[in-house]
Image: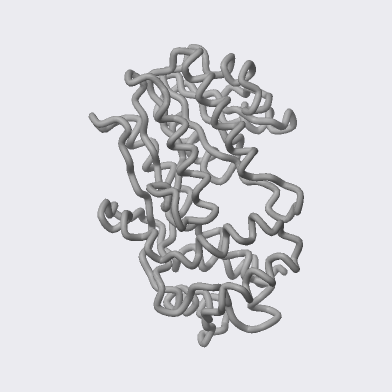
Amino acid sequence: MKIVVTGSLGHISRPLAQELIQKGHAVTVVTSKAERKPGIEKLGAAAAVGKAEDAHFITAAFTGADLVYTMIPPGSMMDPNYDIYAKVRTLMASYRKAIAAAGIKRVIHLSSIGAHTDKGNGLLRLHHVAETTLKQLPADVHLTFMRPTGFYYNLLAYIPMIKQQGLIAANYGQDDHCIWVAPADIATAIVEEIEHPSKESPSIRYVASDELTCSETAHILGEAIGKPDLQWVKIPGQQMLDALVARGMSQAIAEGMVEMYANRNLYEDYFKHRPVLGKTKLTQFAKDFAAVYHQQ
């Protein structure tokens, strides 16, 4: 198959492109950075350099493909002037126009847990907007929405706090759900969906690697870094909001993050469609976490 992968050489797109190439698919990787082109070509993929928000460019990149994989790239979370909501609306409108104009009939989109609702999900509302936008495509376009849980690598953001305060603190913690996923397991799940698509459209697949509580997560990470008594403490939402804004995060993004973390009901739909867990467990990621911890 001819497959276009957006997301450049990111955490998911790189292993996804590698798996697809190994299986004999012809892969084009979309990147906004020309300096990534040699690395993409070294994988055995073609590179399409341009911005996904440019509907003309992304239409040309999609044209001729049997399937496209779309995703929302990470934003400038610490830029107080960054409007992530406007960015996502523009990007998804570009994807929708390009998919229709290029005549694409199969789309796999990287969504997220929490995308099933537009209420109480904070920043995850972006993914609800994304899914809703793609659902506006013609009925003959087969849609698959991948909904991963929390990424392991997001835990790296807590390293400075652990070093300075000796704990992890957020407006969720202790016995709350901490369900994690490895990018490699997401890539594998996407390949499975490509090769064995659901008859339903849109179809939804949750992706997770390990189901733990926050306290269990802290214990595993603590063991890896030599702090077996590491605690994950639950703090008031206002305290977390004030801390995020003080670090330079925009008020809107900080409020969205606090709301997202506060709503533990986001896992209800996950448990209704509980997936088979991926092979990468937190104990494995904890080794990488420890390596970064000791380097900083």
| Front one among 293 and 250 | 250
Number of marks: 0
- Tell which residue pokes out farthest to the front in this image: 119
Q: How was the colour assigned to the protein in this rendering? A: one colour
Task: Give the image quarter of residue 254.
Answer: bottom right
At 35% from the left and 48% from the top, the residue drawn is: 206
273 vs 86, left or right, is left
Q: Percent from the top left, x then y, of residue 8?
A: 61, 34
At 41% from the left and 73% from the top, the residue drawn is: 176
Task: Give the image quarter of residue 56.
Answer: top right
Q: Judge whether residue 185 can be spotted in this image.
A: no
At 69% from the left and 33% from the top, the residue drawn is: 36
- Tell which residue pokes out farthest to the left in this image: 199
Quarter that holds the C terminus: bottom right
Q: Percent from the top left, x then y, of residue 44?
A: 55, 26
Q: Percent from the top left, x then y, of residue 236?
A: 56, 78
Give the answer, above or below, for where 176 lies relative to 1.
below
At 58% from the left and 77% from the top, the residue drawn is: 169
Q: Percent from the top left, x then y, of residue 278?
A: 35, 53
70 vs 162, left or right, is left
| Front one among 144 and 224 | 144
Give the answer, above or below, for where 242 lies relative to 127.
below
Task: Give the image quarter of residue 89.
Answer: top right
231 vs 280, left or right, is right
Quarter that holds the N terminus: top left
Give the answer, above or below, for where 174 lies relative to 29.
below
Q: Judge whether residue 115 can be spotted in this image.
A: yes
| Front one among 211 and 135 | 135
